[in-house]
Amino acid sequence: MSEWLQTYNELWGMYNAGIITSIFGAFAVTFTVLMCWPKLVKDFGPIGGFIAAALIIGTFWVINHKLPGYGFSTGLLLDAENLPMQFSLIHQGARGSAPWVDMGFAIATGFVFADLLCAPKGTRWALTKEAFPRWVVIVIGGIVGGVLVGLTGYTNAAL
Amino acid sequence: MKKYLSTFAGSAICGGAAFGIWPELWKSYGLMGGWLAATLIIGIMWYLNHYNGAIRNPEGKVWLDQGWCIGAAGIAWGIVRFQGDISAFFLAAPTLICCMIGGALAGVTVWVIRSCQTRLDKEESKI
């Protein structure tokens, strides 16, 4: 069992244990956001949203996305195979060199699934069709924003 | 088209802010910087996108969270910033699939909890 967990899955681009922790990390943050965020906003208004952002997202960022390094030290720690160690629950693929996958995907998927399943039967297809163009616009908007910020990589700035 | 303009602007700002600020704060202040980044970015962007409704979410329809644009921006930023080519997306796909499986599981769990709640309410109102 421990042998299997430590095996690096070449096809999947992460350790087998990383697959399990990634799914669990995504589940944990999504469940907490779905259960707590709307209630916090209902109870405290906009202040509740800020509290939720700090407490839920901030805290789950530490467990899901903290990069290698401890505390204030952000230098990469290397494992026995000289690869950057990942202490986060959500593993980044290809030995940590894949483009960044954020836990936002998990939260957003969770909202879509919960809303679609809670809707009465027979209305689900119409709801999906209504949401699809909005979804496309949001994803394109995100890609544009990411590309524009990513252009800093072409300015020779050593950030 | 016009009605999607605010959605587009809100999601582009949100994606850009998240990946312009978050890595820098983390690199400067370590874990506490990441925590602060969540408070600043997600707090302000939530206020913009969801409390003030920059991202269109009509009442009673499927909720599209700003998580979609942050996630999409993360992959696009990673590819452009580190000057990979577009095929680098496939390196990120496994993590993406894991994230979506976890999120979907949580969505299903919340649905089960809520439908149990409504069933209990109905039974109680019968008595």
Image: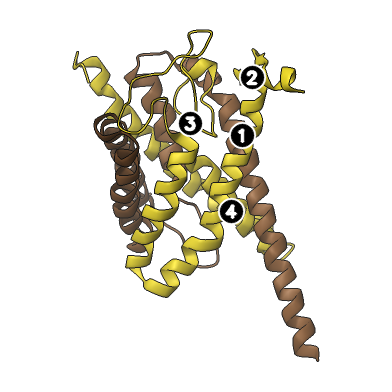
Chain colours: A yellow, B brown
Residue at the location (36% across, 60% down)? Answer: A51
Closer to us: mark 4 or mark 3? 4
Q: Chain of mark 4?
A: A
Residue A156: % across, % down? 19, 13
Q: Would you say B18 lies left or right of B91 here?
A: left
- The amino acid type of the residue labelled 2 equals Trp
A66 and B117: which is toward the camera:
A66
Q: Chain of mark 1?
A: A
Q: Would you say B112 lies left or right of B82 here?
A: right
The answer to whether dots 1 and 2 both sit on one chain is: yes
| Label 4 to label 3: alpha-carbon separation | 18 Å
SS state under label 4: helix
Q: Which residue is mark 3?
A: A101
Rendered image: mark on residue A12: 2
Residue B118 in the image: above or below residue A109: below
Ranked by sequence position, the earlier of labels 4 and 1 is 1
Q: Chain of mark 2?
A: A
Ranked by sequence position, the earlier of labels 1 and 3 is 1
Q: Which residue is mark 1?
A: A21
| Label 1 to label 3: alpha-carbon separation | 14 Å
| Label 1 to label 2: alpha-carbon separation | 14 Å
The answer to whether dots 4 and 3 both sit on one chain is: yes
Closer to us: mark 1 or mark 2? 1
Q: Which residue is mark 4?
A: A31
Could you tell me if residue B58 is visible in this image?
A: no
- The amino acid type of the residue labelled 1 equals Thr
Q: Are marks 1 and 3 in contact (CB under 8 Å)?
A: no
Residue A54: % across, % down? 36, 53
| Label 4 to label 1: alpha-carbon separation | 15 Å
- The amino acid type of the residue labelled 3 equals Val
- The amino acid type of the residue labelled 4 equals Phe
SS state under label 3: loop
